[in-house]
Amino acid sequence: MSIKNRGAIIFTLGALSALGPFSIDMYLPGFPSIADHLHTTISRVQLSLSSYFIGISVGQLFFGPIIDRFGRKKPLYLGLIFYLVASIGCMLSPSVEVLIGLRFLQALGSCAGSVIARAMVRDIFPVHENAKIFSMLILVVAISPIVAPTAGGYMSEAFGWQSIFLALSIISAVILYLSYRILPESKAADPTMSLHPRKILSDFKFVLQTKQFILYVVAAGLSSAGMFAYISGSSFVLIDLYGVNAKHFGWFFAFNASGLIIASQVNRVLLSKKSSESILSVTSVIQLVAALLLFILTYVDFIGLTGIILLLFTYLTMQGFSFPNTSALSLAPFHTRTGIASSLMGCFQMMISAIASVSVSIFHNNTALPMMAVIACCGLLGFVFISMALKHTKAKADVQVALEQVPVD
């Protein structure tokens, strides 16, 4: 693979991975105008975010077996076209109930990009490079919280919230073109892969019985869920409670995303000297401390906007270390069933994120506490699972060393 092709492929895989975050972040500043136009409340509009999380969780389970059976690119085209049509439907929604339903369908299409991007990283690049490649994908993914909320805020005020979904339709069309022109078919169709429900369930069971996979996936999902709790509740906390202008809301997202970008590239450098496990052992502690401080200081009413932003920045920056390393360690055990493993990874991550997002809405009490409490729970549980995962991989490594030292007769 030439250097030029390598860079173009990584960018396109990053764009596929970023489609979901763009679909979330871009319309957040439009919540108040959506609620006004559809004659509903912001809490009802927030359910369209939750339905998106649920849709992307369910859809990934569908695409996993499909891409192992039919290859990567044809299912990708199907998903992106489905997303484009659903986005146009969102733009024309006459009620919040229709918007909630169409966001679910939009998510079904977008999850093809995230599942296939992860599977292609495992297909195309050597396993020892996977964590570095995932770190590079974050460069593209992290553009979303920098550009999307800011663009969404200005578009919503200038042209109405419907223009946000028109923009998402155009973005998906561009990504579809790039996928067609740039991405190789990294795995040919495999007629031996059965789509019989019993065989699919058997493959799912095999992946779920891989302890390294399940521990790192749940740890990653909990860590990510804290970020989505922030995404779900931040518009209310920052705009309504702290008086941040909707047009300036995106700058706070940009500040937090800058930490994510810097961390992902520091992680790429550190991987030349340190293992993924050693990096996670430090960053998981920092993330836990930031999450607990957010809740405690909010609970005792000893924190202002600056304190909230700085602690959120610390928590989200650690995602730049968590995502690439947990993703690589989750997929490392698999040479086959990569699509299924990728789909289960995304499903767990989005299911946990959906629970976090819904929890912020359910426990909404006109304060910042529900968002902070969910972030604290995610940080604590994520730390517990990271600790168990690190203990498991260390034990596996010790066994492997011991076996290599056994003399051969």
Image: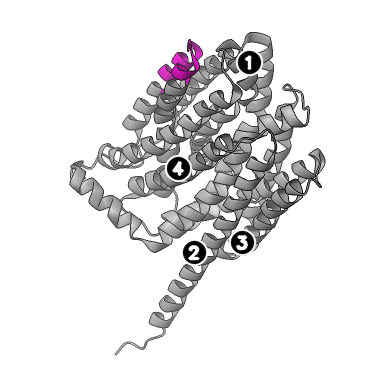
Measured Cα–Cα span from mark 4 to mark 1: 28 Å
Q: Position of residue 343 (x, y in %)?
A: 38, 43
Q: Helix, strand or loop at disc 4?
A: helix
- Main SS, magenta region, reads helix
Q: Position of residue 131 (x, y in %)?
A: 53, 53
Q: In the displayed structure, does residue 376 sit left or right of residue 88? A: right
Q: In the rendered structure, which disc, 4 or 1, sits on the residue that comes first in sequence? A: 1
Which of the two marks, 2 or 3, is nearer to us in this view? Answer: 2
Residue assigned mark 1:
33
Measured Cα–Cα span from mark 2 to mark 4: 20 Å
Which of the two marks, 3 or 1, is nearer to us in this view? Answer: 1
Residue contact between numbered discs 2 and 4, judged by CB atoms under 8 Å? no
Residue contact between numbered discs 4 and 1, judged by CB atoms under 8 Å? no
Q: In the rendered structure, which disc, 1 or 2, sits on the residue that comes first in sequence? A: 1
Q: Which mark is residue 279?
A: 3
Residue assigned mark 2:
389
Q: Helix, strand or loop at disc 1?
A: helix
Residue assigned mark 4:
351
